[in-house]
Image: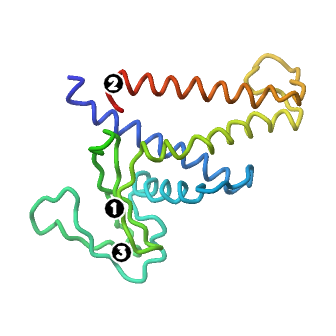
Amino acid sequence: MWVEFAFQYQKMLSDYWIGSVYEIFRLLRDRKLADVPLGFSEVLTDLELIRMPLEKHELPKDRKLEAPLEMIRNPPKNDSTDIYVYDPKDNRRAHIMGFGVSTKTGSVIWHGIDIASKSDRWIERRDLADRSPLYLGTMALVLWLIPLRAKQRNPFEAHSAATRPIDNSGAAPRRLRQQCARAKGLREGVTHQFGME
């Protein structure tokens, strides 16, 4: 039974991952919480191309379309409904994004359509994950430092009204690096265990 639903579980978890990571990147960009390093906007663009069709069933930034798009259904039904028109002004519009499995890594891939550049491409979840750790680590550090700088109560200590003193010794970044290294080791262990390399 596990074999029958393995891809469905993988796809479901990958879809949730996209929505969560997109929100972290959007928060970093919108609130200007961290310096924008090289490659940040490319990862965010890829996340946007996937998230909009996944969560809203529409093309990202479809308001920029000058005319309705003629689309081909994926996977095809091999009948007259394979070709349909996507009109951003139609309230009944819908776009179900194409997806599959990467033959290179076994990761979920999605077919993203970029209206701004008038192009399309397949985007792999594993590739996004490999390009994201630097930014996710930055976000974890920012979220850890915000309560400290404001001298607010630590949200993880539910029953304590005491505040944690600001740590200027460099231990916080060191702990973050250690946690990231442990998480990476766990991720590698899981991928080896399930043959997802």
Q: Is residue 130 above or below residue 119?
A: above
Q: Is residue 34 left or right of residue 87?
A: right
Distance (Cα) linking label 3 and label 2: 42 Å
Residue furthest top as drawn? 159
Q: Position of residue 121 (x, y in %)?
A: 36, 62
Residue drawn 23% across the image and 71% down it: 84
Numbered disc 1: secondary structure: loop
Residue 63: x and y in percent read 48, 74
Cβ–Cβ under 8 Å for marks 1 and 2? no
Disc number for residue 194: 2
Q: Circle 2 sits in a helix, a strand or a loop, which is it? A: loop
Determine which residue is flagged by label 3: 87
At label 2, counting other C-alpha atoms closer than 10 Å, the crowd grade (few under 14, some 14-19, many 20 or more) is few
Asked if residue 119 lies left or right of residue 132, the reply is left
Q: Amino acid at mark 1?
A: His
Q: Which residue is mark 1?
A: 95
Q: Earlier in the sequence, mark 3 or mark 1?
A: 3
What is the three-letter code of the residue carrying label 2? Phe
Q: Residues within 10 Å of mark 1 (few under 14, many from 20)?
A: some
Q: Compared to 85, does 31 lie above or below?
A: above
Quadrant assignment, res 188: top left
Q: Which badge, 3 or 2, is on the more N-terminal residue?
A: 3
| Left or right relative to 24: residue 76 | left
